[in-house]
Image: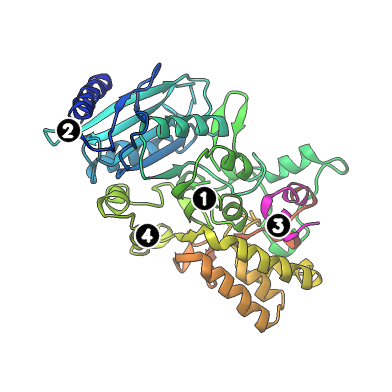
């Protein structure tokens, strides 16, 4: 059962305790825990030549961007599943669990406020949920400005030795906002010539394009970088905008959303976190993680057990049957992604003609319903006929980035997963002129020059 208590009283008590310690301490390191003027929160300050106490706690932020068709699933993750797991107390050195959430009340998408709250275990053993900040109903969760505001507040209010974030929402990788759900309409409305510039290999791929939300019988089962369904249209973030929304370096950034496993996303966010947790394919609405155990993996040990979390997450799906046995998970270390870009740039330059004529229908894809925009990174080069000597260099570069990867044998009975490198990439040979024009400006493409 989650109860609510006055956050100000907790902070006031902490401030009094800190003042008492500072008066009695002879240590050069002297903590001063006070309230930041004008807002609630804990702010550690320095006293002249005295040093601040070194931080030992860690902060975990769940960022729930659910003002969309996932509202019910995200609410279940946070309000039913998460409370069953491990939670720290509220002491000054205890780890901190925070939840920022904006979720719809129903499919009418009536505008609602969003909240940032702290959840911890009280002295009586029950969970306490304190609302720290309320955001007005016109605030868009899937925006760089809002994410930056939330994270800036979190760091100011809770100084810590490390920060991690789990981001949950719809997602479509690097693609332009609105394209994935209805590519035909997007192409038609943005075309300057014939009004309909579709895939160069659409006939070879064989499935007609249509509206994903109305034509796909499983559309409600998957999580499709963020989405808010506002009255003026859907609001989504580009990879660059998402990066701009993170004002400081994270220990890890884990995505519970579809198509986050593109190398375009990884490269665009490589300077924002030490580790990225992603899925190259879609994610079932239930979510990538078992939220009843996620905090145990991330906070209970002396350091986050990211590999253990992803192994547990994968096995949860791999034990199931039918369309529910559908998952692709990858944990990446970001310090090697720049090296991977250098290798890919050289291969793209050396084998540009072969890549331009890649046999798309033979390459491992991670898509359904002919959304042919996500192909296995390694398999693109392999099926394009790149010599084995160069393929070894590429595989070594990919493996240096991948900490853990796993995929089920198939995905929702729509496609088999025979090859799995852990990351996807856009394939211009199966793309469109319009997508190429967007792709040119992606940081990954600037680095490797896949589309010129």
* Label 2 packing within 10 angstroms: few (<14), some (14-19), many (20+): some
C-alpha gap between disc 1 and disc 3? 24 Å
Left or right of 192? Residue 221 is left
- Of the two numbered discs 1 and 2 on the same chain, state the one appearing first in sequence: 2
Would residue 208 be visible to someone looking at this image? Answer: yes
Colour convention of the picture: rainbow
List the residue tagged with mark 3: 447
Of the two numbered discs 1 and 3 in the rendering, the one whose residue sits closer to the viewer? 3
C-alpha gap between disc 2 and disc 3? 50 Å
C-alpha gap between disc 4 and disc 1? 15 Å
The secondary element bearing badge 1 is classed as loop
Q: Write the residue at 75% across / 51% down.
A: 440
Residue 225 image position (x, y, % from top left): 56, 43
Of the two numbered discs 4 and 1 in the rendering, the one whose residue sits closer to the viewer? 1
List the residue tagged with mark 4: 317
Left or right of 61? Residue 8 is left
Between 112 and 141, the one lying in front of the other is 141
User: On residue 308, which mark appears?
Assistant: none
Residue 140 belongs to the span the image colors magenta = no
C-alpha gap between disc 2 and disc 4? 33 Å
- Of the two numbered discs 2 and 4 on the same chain, state the one appearing first in sequence: 2
* Label 3 packing within 10 angstroms: few (<14), some (14-19), many (20+): some
List the residue tagged with mark 2: 122
The secondary element bearing badge 2 is classed as loop
Residue 443 belongs to the span the image colors magenta = yes
- Of the two numbered discs 2 and 3 on the same chain, state the one appearing first in sequence: 2
Highlighted magenta segment, given as a residue range: 436-452
List the residue tagged with mark 1: 258
Q: Are marks 2 and 3 in contact (CB under 8 Å)?
A: no
Between 173 and 146, the one lying in front of the other is 146
C-alpha gap between disc 4 and disc 3? 35 Å
């Amino acid at each position: 059962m989650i109860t609510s208590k006055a956050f100000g009283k907790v902070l006031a008590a902490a401030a009094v305790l800190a003042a008492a310690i500072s008066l009695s301490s002879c240590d050069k390191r002297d903590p001063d825990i006070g309230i930041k003027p004008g807002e609630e929160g804990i702010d550690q300050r320095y006293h002249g030549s005295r040093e601040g106490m070194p931080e030992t706690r860690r902060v975990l932020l769940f960022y729930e961007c659910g003002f969309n068709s996932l509202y019910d699933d995200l609410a279940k993750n946070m309000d039913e599943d998460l409370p069953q797991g491990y939670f720290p107390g509220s002491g000054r050195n205890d780890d901190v669990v925070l939840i920022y959430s904006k979720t719809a009340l129903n499919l009418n998408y009536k505008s609602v406020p969003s909240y940032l709250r702290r959840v911890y275990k009280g002295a009586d053993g029950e969970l306490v949920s304190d609302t720290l900040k309320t955001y007005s109903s016109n605030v868009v969760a899937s925006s760089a400005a809002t994410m930056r505001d939330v994270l800036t507040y979190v760091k100011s209010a809770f100084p810590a030795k490390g920060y991690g974030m789990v981001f949950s929402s719809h997602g479509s990788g690097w693609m332009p906002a609105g394209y994935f759900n209805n590519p035909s309409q997007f192409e038609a409305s943005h075309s300057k010539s014939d009004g309909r510039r579709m895939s160069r290999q659409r006939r070879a791929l064989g499935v007609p394009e249509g509206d994903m939300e109305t034509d796909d019988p499983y559309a409600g089962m998957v999580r499709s970088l963020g989405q808010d369904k506002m009255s003026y249209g859907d609001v989504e973030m580009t990879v660059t905008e998402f990066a701009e929304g993170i004002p400081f370096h994270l220990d890890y950034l884990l995505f519970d959303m579809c198509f986050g496993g593109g190398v375009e996303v990884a490269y665009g966010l490589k300077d924002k976190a030490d580790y990225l947790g992603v899925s190259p394919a879609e994610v079932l609405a239930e979510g990538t993680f078992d939220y009843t155990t996620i905090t145990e993996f991330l906070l209970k040990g002396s350091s986050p057990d990211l590999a253990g979390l992803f192994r547990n997450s994968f096995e949860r799906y791999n034990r199931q049957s039918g369309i529910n046995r559908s998952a692709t998970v990858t944990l990446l270390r970001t310090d090697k992604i720049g090296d991977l870009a250098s290798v890919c740039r050289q291969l793209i330059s050396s084998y540009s003609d072969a890549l331009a004529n890649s046999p798309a229908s033979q390459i491992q894809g991670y898509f359904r319903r002919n959304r042919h925009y996500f192909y296995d990174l390694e398999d693109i080069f392999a099926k394009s006929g790149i010599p084995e000597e160069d393929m070894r260099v590429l595989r070594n570069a990919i493996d240096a980035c991948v900490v853990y990867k796993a995929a089920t044998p198939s995905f929702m009975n729509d496609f088999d997963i025979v090859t799995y490198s852990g990351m996807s990439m856009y394939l211009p040979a199966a793309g469109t002129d319009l997508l190429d024009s967007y792709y040119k400006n992606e940081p990954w493409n600037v680095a490797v020059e896949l589309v010129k």
